Amino acid sequence: MATYTEIPRDIALDPRDIATHIIARSIKAGATEAEAIVREGSASSTVVRLGKVETLEDAGSRELSLRVFVGQRAASTHSNDFTPEGIDQLVNDALGLVHLMSEDPFAGLPEPSQFGALSGDLQLYYEDVRGLPPDGRINYALRAEQASLEGDPRLKNSAGGSFNTFVGRIVLANSRGFVGESCSSHCTVAAAPIAQSEDGSMQSDYWFSSARSLRKLESSESVGKEAARRTLRKLGARSVASTKVPVVFDPMVSGPILRNICDAVNGASVYRRASFLAGRLGEKVASTNITVIDDGTMPGGFGTSPFDGEGVPTQRTVVIERGVLKSYLLNTYVARKLNLSSTGNASGGRAGNPGIGSTNFFLEAGVRTPQQIIGAIKDGFYVTEFLGFGANLVTGNFSRGASGLWIENGELGSAVEEVTIAGNLKDMINNISEIGNDLVFRSSTACPTLRVDGMTIAGL
Amino acid sequence: MIANESLFFQKFGVTARDLQRYLGEALSTGGDYAELYFEYLTSTSISLGESIVKSASRGRDLGCGVRVLAGEHTGYAYTDDLAPEKILCAARTAALIARGPAQHSVQNLKERATQHLYEVSSPSADADMAAKLELVTCADRAARAYDPRIIEVQCTYVDELRQILVAASDGTYAMDVQPLARLLLGCIARSGVNSARGQFGGGGRMGIDYFRAQGLPAHYAQEAARQALIQLDAREAPAGEMEVVLGPGWPGILLHEAVGHGLEADYNRKGASAFAGLMGKRVASEKCTVVDNGTLPWRRGSINMDDEGSPSQNTVLIENGILTSYLSDKLSARLMKITDTGNGRRESYEHIPLPRMTNTYMLAGDDCPEDIIRSVKHGIYAVNFGGGQVDVTNGKFVFSMSEAYMIENGKVGAPLKNCSLIGNGPDALTKVSMVGNDLKLDEGLGTCGKDGQSVPVGVGMPTVKLDSMIVGGTG
């Protein structure tokens, strides 16, 4: 019985070498084209609760993905077994599978002229994230939690403070000669306090800051303080009677609405006729104050990368310009089907063909502050949280649980929960009457405060 | 004694002595419990669109997670390289949670007799790839043949075989081989300018023969197509509080969201659940008895053992309306001094185990489903749902209807557009006034997410009437 350590290691563990080795093996085994992705990363997670460490996690992981073509047939495999035996199996499985597949005239790698990677420093990787020892991580989490429990006796409990890091490298290579490599780092500090009112009812909320470098992170104290503010304002929440009033969406919920728009302009949904925006290119689909951009080139962005999941350089794509639908998000396969060009939005899925994903996806900021937008409303609903998943991209139908604060004479008033908010995305993006000036990238999708008119609130 | 039959012994050269050594290393800094979780997962994924197979892939993943507990504190590390020095390194990393001299020794590992809730017909996912491809094409044909208004069909088939070994310093030594398969269809229907979608499918811990033998691809296809066509004519759902009748089966997601998550022991241990302190109290009408049962043969949520090596069981959560039990793993059971219910589950070796549900359902009552519908003056009849979500701390939960109808004067009427229902966990089930005699479990599609970890689960319910719930439409 051979033990693991006796297996000879005849290939070097440089990910570039592994990727090109896998491609060479695949071609030798009969593939006409091949694409290999090697990912490696190390992640840490630190959770503290009530001033003590609750969980410390630290680990590295690796993954190999292979896509092979025999003519117009394609198949893929993935594995985390980097031994020569494991790589043999990866290649053999892919070649075994590909012969069972039917021909697809649109299948194939991008054209050689399309390959490439953005040059220059995209500011995606910082050494300080990797270098932080466990005590340093614990300190970030402890300070965030402590700040989230200070200053108000109603802050009685905590779901914890946390600090997470990820440092990773991806290498993508294909049989047409492309080899790309990208490193990235990411860290997040968060706090989730629990507040209790006199009648015993509890509320929790959270706040966080993410960055690619420790230096760019907001302070643990400011994160904790904001978490406390957001949690305390939920106390005493009640349902309201069903009504139709103007609704203002905080960026924490306007972001998820923008995600729905992002899914609706995903070329894969478009060619399947599974999107309410299919067939609308060049038409006015939203109010004229709306401009939506996908930009994979922003230095330091959470969605930035030098190349997409197929080795095509990322780009800046205007999706909606002053209300007119200008472009879908496309990978090579879908672009061929729709007779368009890839927008560099292939997502590197672990299994199967590349999907389509956004990069840095945002709605351009307006000029008014959130306070000005709220101040202009006599009776309305300021939504800060969604619950449930109620968007139907085929029909545009939208219905989700919501909580937030009632707007009374231009001021934020009593807390509201246990209501739903419903409408249709087609109408909602045409009824955005105000856009805030508060565009902040907390993740790869960002949207300012939005005011939307004509939605229905269902409650008691 | 340990039978030297495990995959990990055979394929990766891990011996019983190795296990003792790794556990000893993990306890060397004073931890009071250490555990090794070995996993080898093979998977298949196929997707079809426009009547051709668009994507097919296979995967293999293996690794070992090491957990060390010291009081309430958890250290965790994992490796995808099973070389002894890598596992020892993970053990030392996990051991950083404790700081001091070793205090506990590793008990002798004793193999535990296991349940046999599912059989593995083929020992690997290699078997019959062509037959799997045939499943999705057969489903596609059936959906398109159902009605010419079905303009597009998406079909996915995924399966996996998970082989796990748990060895822990308390003497636990247990293994399981868990198959899991799922076939899912989505249909788009169009009539004039109207489009709509429908979705249906099923699965469980079974092999491909299950789908073929019972003609399930065609059944799923017709059901997905039917739901899409119904949505073409759907009208706006009403907004506000009203009587709600939930159909049998998948609407049991109500129980998963309204009570299941809130009864997971970790939330209660930390005082973060709206159910904290309600043990022994009334949380539902006396017609409600709710269980979490991991021991149902073949079901998607079933497990011979949990991911800590403890046998799964049938736990009564609510008995005739009274809260009777939490769902626990080893850590919460020890800290709360309650029984470990065998609900410590994890997504993979990269994750720590947490208290999770298995198959959660309400037992049948005495009411005839027709009588339940007849009793409603003005309300809705909801028979199919999409996903749901709960805020465990304030108890508010939401789940989204994908097929529902108006009920007027005891008669089922027009179909309604998708919308959400919202309620409050600790009192939602107090509004249950009728419970049908038609208990049904779901088809086997459910996946539950918690703290970024996904695990397969099941739900079920008889037809149930709630006297009031908030319906989130626009009408």
Image (cartoon, coloured by chain):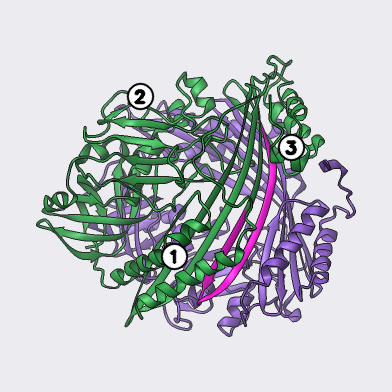
| Crowdedness near tag 1: few (<14), some (14–19) or many (≥20) residues, C-alpha within 10 Å | many
Looking at the image, residue A170 lies above or below residue B423: below
Residue stretch in magenta: B43-66
Is A200 situated left or right of B463 in this image?
right
Secondary structure, mark 3, is helix
The residues tagged by marks 1 and 3 sit, at their Cα atoms, a distance apart of: 39 Å
| Crowdedness near tag 3: few (<14), some (14–19) or many (≥20) residues, C-alpha within 10 Å | some
Q: Nearer the viewer, residue B447 or A403?
A: B447
Looking at the image, residue B182 lies above or below residue B338: below
Is B24 situated left or right of A138 in this image?
right
Q: Residue at x 58, y 65 (%)?
A: A357
Is most of the magenta stretch helix, strand or loop? strand
> Which mark is drawn over residue B217?
1
Q: Is residue B196 magenta?
A: no
Residue that carries the numbered disc 3 in the rendered image: B9
Residues marked 2 and 1, same chain: yes
Which chain has been coloured green in this picture? B
Secondary structure, mark 2, is loop
Q: Residue at x 44, y 72 (%)?
A: A274
Q: Earlier in the sequence, mark 1 or mark 3?
A: 3
Please say if the residues under marks 2 and 1 sit with CB atoms less than 8 Å apart: no
Q: Quadrant of residue B94?
A: top right
Q: Residue at x 48, y 25 (%)?
A: B340
Disc 1: host chain: B
Residue that carries the numbered disc 2 in the rendered image: B277
What amino acid is at disc 3? Phe
Q: Nearer the viewer, mark 2 or mark 3?
A: 3
Which chain has been coloured purple in this picture? A
Disc 3: host chain: B
Quarter holding the C terminus of chain B is bottom left
Q: Earlier in the sequence, mark 2 or mark 3?
A: 3
Residue B149, percent from left and from top: 35, 79
